Image (cartoon, rainbow, N blue to C red):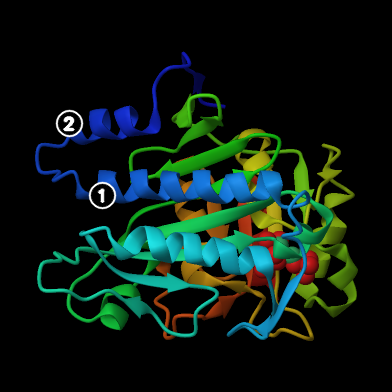
């Protein structure tokens, strides 16, 4: 757990204070993260009103991943695109919902960053008013958009997520720890909740879709079986929204895993805007993330919508998960 802080440190003030500690900082990354906070407020507002205003349900279209697009997926995506279309230092938006990068070009733009997003993570939860999130990754643009973004996770300038749950929580890291903010709806600001969150080295949460157990390869199955013989009793928690499951693990420790299976030999989750940003959060908090054989942050993608097998969580559980992959 990080230190509990007094209530009036807003996200913007916190970012500016951090920026002042780095003499080389231009304030541009601060502005991009601050804008993500604004989009989070917009999406949070839609979530709060969704059931009342008939925003649940499908649009009738299918996205680039072959998934049915929900109205709130589309609303979430537009909220990000519209917000960044007018932000000078963002030159491209890459989204789970868009086939190709949305490139923003104009003479006057500095085009320093690309923002990669999963606008609504866990969208199967939308129709029943359950918890969902947004995931973001910020990368520096150097040369062409594809060239700049098809880089290892270690190349991310910042990353994080927003969770739309009991409260709306924004968690980010720009490489100096993991910090979380809670949306105070009365003042319309994210205020500091925890600074420098540390994930327990060993935890008590196990989070996976055990409905897929039979399709998993032997390392994942053997890992799952081995949990029963651990001295410590694990609690099984699986919400259907990775952001929510990871948030719990961030504070309480444990492991989330979505391995390759018979139907999806490449895994289900997307490297660039789901796994890599969350891996940065986990590592910055003292945890780890792996495919089973490779550190997620070391993977150099060959396509934007690449999928990978994924496990994330405390050092102990991730180490054990990898042991079963090494053995096989
Ligand atoms: O697509 C991402 C995601 O929705 C995650 O947020 C979640 O953990 C997982 O997929 C749920 O997938 P499934 O319904 O197959 O368990």
State the residue in front, 12 or 260. 12
Q: Nearer the viewer, residue 147 or 49?
A: 49
Q: Do callouts 1 and 2 mark residues in contact (Cβ within 8 Å)?
A: no
Badge 1 element? helix
Against 326, is 207 above or below?
above
Please state the quadrant of the image where ligand 1 appears.
bottom right
Q: Nearer the viewer, residue 96 or 62?
A: 62
Query: In the rendered image, is residue 245 in sight?
Result: no
Residue occupied by mark 1: 29
Place of residue 6 in the rendered image (x, y in percent of width and height, measured from the top left): 46, 13
* Residue highlighted by disc 2: 20
Quarter of the figure that contains the C terminus = bottom right
What's the CA distance linking mark 1 and mark 2? 12 Å
Looking at the image, residue 54 lies above or below residue 202: below
State the SS at label 2: helix
Rendered location of residue 299, percent (x, y): 43, 73
Most extreme residue toward the front is: 53
Crowding near the residue tagged with mark 1, few <14, some 14–19, many ≥20 C-alpha atoms within 10 Å? many
Q: The N terminus is located in which quarter? A: top right
**Residue at coordinates 72% horizontally, 52% vertically from top-left?**
50
Give the percent coordinates (x, y) of residue 10: 39, 27
Q: Earlier in the sequence, mark 1 or mark 2?
A: 2
């Amino acid at each position: 757990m990080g230190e509990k802080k007094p209530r009036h440190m807003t996200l913007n003030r916190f970012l500016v204070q951090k920026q002042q500690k780095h003499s080389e900082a231009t304030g541009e990354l601060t502005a991009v993260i601050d804008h993500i906070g604004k989009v989070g407020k917009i999406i949070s507002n839609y979530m709060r009103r969704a059931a009342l205003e008939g925003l649940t349900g499908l649009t009738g279209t299918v996205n680039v991943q072959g998934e049915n697009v929900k109205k709130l997926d589309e609303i979430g995506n537009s909220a990000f695109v519209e917000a960044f279309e007018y932000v000078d230092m963002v030159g491209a938006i890459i989204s789970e919902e868009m086939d190709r990068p949305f490139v923003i070009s104009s003479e006057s733009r500095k085009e320093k960053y690309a923002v990669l997003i999963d606008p609504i993570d866990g969208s199967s939860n939308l129709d029943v008013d359950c918890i969902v999130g947004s995931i973001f990754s910020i990368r520096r643009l150097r040369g062409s958009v594809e060239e700049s973004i098809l880089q290892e996770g270690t190349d991310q300038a910042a990353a994080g997520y927003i969770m739309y749950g009991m409260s709306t929580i924004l968690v980010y890291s720009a490489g100096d720890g993991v910090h979380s903010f809670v949306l105070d709806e009365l003042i319309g600001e994210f205020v500091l909740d925890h600074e420098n969150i540390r994930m327990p080295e060993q935890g008590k949460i196990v989070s996976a879709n055990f409905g897929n157990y039979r399709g998993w390869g032997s390392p994942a199955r053997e890992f799952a079986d081995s949990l029963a013989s651990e001295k410590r009793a694990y609690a099984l928690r699986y919400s259907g929204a990775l952001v929510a499951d990871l948030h719990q693990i961030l504070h309480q420790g444990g492991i989330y895993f979505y391995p390759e299976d018979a139907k999806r030999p490449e895994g289900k989750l997307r490297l660039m805007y789901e796994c890599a940003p969350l891996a940065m959060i986990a590592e910055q908090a003292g945890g780890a993330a792996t495919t089973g054989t490779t550190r997620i942050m070391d993977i150099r993608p060959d396509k934007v919508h690449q999928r990978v097998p994924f496990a994330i969580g405390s050092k102990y559980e991730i180490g054990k998960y990898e042991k079963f992959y090494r053995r096989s």
